[in-house]
Amino acid sequence: MNGFQVVVLWSDALLALLLLACGAGIAAALRREHLRRAWRAVFANRSAMAALVVLLAYLLVAILDSFHFRPALERQAAASAAPAQYSVEVLSLLDVALARMRTTREDSYSAPFATHAFRKRMIEMPDGTQQRDYPRLQFGGAQLADPAADRGADIARRGLGGAAAGLALWAFMAGALAVFVARGRREPVRRTLGAILGGNTEVAWGAFGWMLLLVLCAGGALFALSGGYHVLGTDATGNDVLYQTFKAMRIALLIGTLATFVVLPLGIGLGLAAGYFGGWVDDLIQYVYTVISSIPYVLLIAAASLMMQLVIEQHAEVFDTAAARADARLVALCVIIGAISWTTLCRLLRAETLKLRETDYVQAARCFGVSGVRIMLRHILPNAFHIVLITLVLEFSGLVLAEAVLSYVGVGVDPTTTSFGTMINNARGELAQDPVIWWSITAAFVFMVALVLAANLFADAVREAFDPRAAALPRRRRVPRESAA
Amino acid sequence: MSAATLSVSGLSTHIDSENGLVRALDCVSFEVHAGETFALLGESGCGKSVTALSLMRLLPPGGCVAGGSVMLDGRDLCALTETEMRQVRGAGMAMIFQEPGTSLNPVLTVGQQIGEVLALHRGLKGAAADGEAVALMTQVGIPDPQRRLREYPFQFSGGMKQRVMIAMALAGEPRLLIADEPTTALDVTIQAQVLDVMAALQRARGMAMILITHDLGVVAKMADRVGVMYAGHLIEEAPRGRFFAAPAHPYSRKLFEALPEGHRERGVLATIPGSVPPLTAHFTGCRFAPRCDRAWERCRAEAPQWHALEGGQRVRCHLHDPAESMRAAVQPASRSAAVSPARATEEILLGVRDMKVHFPITSGVFRRVVGHVKAVDGVSLDIGAGRTLALVGESGCGKTTVGKAILRLIEPSGGSARLGDKDIGSLSGSALRATRASMQMIFQDPFGSLNPRLRVIEIIEEGMNALGVSGSDAERRERVVQIMEQVGLRPELAERYPHEFSGGQRQRIAIARALAVSPRLIVCDEPTSALDVSVQAQILNLLQELQARLGVAYLFITHNIAVVEYLAHEVAVMYLGRIVEQGSVAEVLGNPQHPYTRALLAAVPRANADAGAGADAVLVKGDLPSPANPPAGCHFHPRCPLATETCRQEYPQARAVDGTHVVSCHLAG
């Protein structure tokens, strides 16, 4: 490869912005004592820390998949003076890392770990005769001389090798973590390591460590195996399903997070205004969200996204690559989903604001002639912020699932983009075949459930830590009965 | 003496909390006999309610009885299984809670809730149960019980709900009734009614009763014997007469001295420095020693034992150890000198004329106005610079609304209010903002009036920022430090968050916030009603001192007559949105003219030993009517024992009695 051109898609920029905002949010949270205490409770929760590992793994894949570039084309010797020509294909760092999966395209379906195609075809034998049989795959298990005999041993060898590499990486990371934690606790590293693995630290590093071990070993084994096989098989056009699932992770995360970009200002602004000002402002905002939430959301999104599609197609000249066009459609989808999902947050915030507006400290601020906007930002929002946070983390999984539903109906992401929804949509036909082609939908299902489950577990911990009502109920612990005095 | 109904010995209760093990009760022992009322007295956080919950075995999660025994009629309750215990609750002993509003289930009728107890403990169902429920409701003084049996809790007023609670508690015919602050949430007039009902029922049934309260007046009216609790310990136990005549423990004495009632000389009230220690701590000496002005080395080193005094009194204090008789004889001077009286000026600071606040009642799709709640209906009052006007009345009479309307937190619907030479009602925008610096407010609940997300310094600075007071950050910072010292807070606490402070300290922060903009008038909305007696004394002293030093005027909204006597110069008594009697403290409290004022004064329980005897004073009947539909004529006539035909027909005009004393009553003068 000789040179490349960096491509910044809209969604990449927005994701970067989102990560920066998260970083700023964390910095702000660390300064505020009550937030620090709540987050400490989240990190002391074992299932939350385990879920965090899974979320971070997805995030890592999504970030890798968000550095896009166009590789330069091979130049003709004669045209060496001409400016470099770049491929119309936009690649990401993830594509480079998974180049082997991306480029090993078979003709059609093949089962996981298969060495032969899924369907019989007429093949030409070395002696010139033609025979109807399962042809050898071009890439899957191509390294094996005698697939029937060698396959099991080869899979075990590769899998164990990959897992061992994962283990080594984990040992290194665990060591680094132990040193880091030991410095905070001011005690020997060895003792800290014992405390971490035994789950005796204040932050549940133990659960974090063990989950990390699982993820790294599984990841290492998958990576090693994908060098010789299609671990999750291939789809109708012979694309590696594992590669598709990796690509789908970014879309799922993007939809889940970018939509909140739109939800936040709408939900917070309108919710606070409705609750604080009351009167006709409240009436108007209530009417708007009641109307929006009474229309079936699939219908609303279908209409809006078809319109967006039309707009994008009419202005094709704005987008220089197919990826840019698909990306514009993705961002549009996020905006549309966000624009109709703010109602929940708005409703909850309105109710909380109605309550907080009557508190004595807001009355005291009004006594000083503090302006309405300032009261909302300084007195009401910080005291209602747990609602914002809890709603957002709970809605994340809902948004991921919404994408799947929308793509299944055909109004979601661009058909050229791989998402969990498009994978499930394609699987519609596959499930009706005999023998059934189960791997595509299984892969989408397993990876999507893992993401949503992790998000839900984490959301649960966040809700528990931030919800003032949950804090009112102390956890039940056994108390030793002392002997009577 | 017969065997005690309830005998508690060495009861210890531990509660596991995030801050460590709370030893909420530590070796508490007492006895209650049939037909006797035992009052548990103490400040919040001393373990009074935990005692009640331990007896019922209804401790919160994480709590357990760690030792000791509870014998009810010879049965050890701690040894019972949970199933057996359920039989004891309700039938053996029953409990009344503080908040009548939340102790009844809103979706069941009152009859169903009483019937549930009857079915459980007495096996009564159907008509028999209804008959018994009607009988119970008659006993607790609920009029028209046949009809009210079918009604839901929201159709009852607070006092009536508490009566229903009492009827429910009595339905199981318990041997022991535990009343946990049964009248704290009620108005004085209603409190007097409910206490009378309880006393009569106890006499009739020969029940034992444990009355938990922080109010010495209630103790004086109800109790036969008194137990004082402090930090999980019972520290003094005495018959009522002995207790009120000669409280033995320094803590009990301080409780009496901290009461504002009867101190019209406006002296400095005695206070107890500090607050109740957290019960997670480990104590070596006497628990009260750090706050006691008579403590010496022995108190800090050695926990005191019980010492029996004459007349059945016993106390847990080294002072009463016969070996220390030298010390007990020396009584410290209890009261310090009075502060110099505030500058008496003739200048009128605040003049309110015929102020009205009417809230529209709307109905239907188009929000048509169908009526008005006349929360404030023509109130006129004057406050001189540096003076205190107390606005007194039952809850719901509109006194808080008056305060908020003066500050324009609620827009008045009529009338005018002048502060100095400015008409507050006609101001708007920046002119109103400039005037806001001259008038501020202090709220009732110190836990709700401070934004929990802001540090103390940000809270105090807010007013200065909003009103653009003083320039640079350093100057402002200096001003905050100065104000914090003024209200008795250490300046190094400025970086803390409100939740790290006790109730009294929070109220000081709220006062500092108001003072930061140098107001000339502060509206105090029941600033001490959420505080314990000793802390209330601290805050009253502070308000008094600030007035003497800064010449600030107070509009003091309260229902506590004792505080009025102590702090106010003038009084205005409010009833259903109108002022019925007004004048100087001496005129109104010394010579009350309006029947309502008289009833209000009679209903206040006084903290002296012969209070129980004088309980047959005129009590006002019934509840406050709705301000949406006030009675025709004099608003008070349905509850007035002296009402005549004229009272039912026309509202009485205000007429001067003598001096500044004005009253609105046909019968006065």
Image (cartoon, coloured by chain):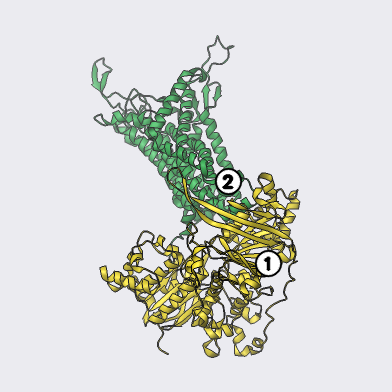
Chain colours: A green, B yellow
Q: Is residue B13 visible?
A: no
Left or right, B157 with reference to B241: left
Pointer 1 residue: B542
Would you say residue A431 is visible in this rendering?
A: yes
Residue B112: percent from left, percent from top:
32, 64
Residue A205 drawn at (x, y percent): 49, 51
- Viewer-side residue, B508 vs B200: B200
**Residue at the image point whose x is 41% and y is 40% from the top:** A398
**Most foreground residue, B630 or A378:** B630
* Mark 1, secondary structure of its residue: helix
Q: Position of residue A201 (x, y in %)?
A: 51, 55
Q: Amino acid at mark 2?
A: Met
Of residues B281 and B429, the one drawn nearer to the viewer in this rendering: B429
* Element type at mark 2: helix
Q: Amino acid at mark 1?
A: Leu
When the figure is inspected, residue A458 is found, relative to residue A316, above or below; the finding is below
The span from disc 1 to disc 2 (Cα, nearest Å) is 32 Å
* Chain label for disc 2: A
Vertical position of residue B606 compared to residue B405: above or below: below
Q: Nearer the viewer, residue B484 or B518?
A: B518
Which corner quadrant of the image does residue B64 belong to? bottom left
Q: Is residue B259 left or right of residue A251?
A: right
Residue A332 shown left or right of residue B206 in the figure: right
Q: Chain of mark 1?
A: B
Same subunit: marks 1 and 2: no
User: How dense is the environment of label 1, judged by Cα within 10 Å: few (below 14), some, or many (20 and up)?
Assistant: some
Q: Position of residue B111 (x, y in %)?
A: 33, 66
Q: Residues within 10 Å of mark 2 (few under 14, many from 20)?
A: many
Q: Which residue is mark 2?
A: A376
Q: In the figure, residue B356 lies in which quadrant?
A: bottom right
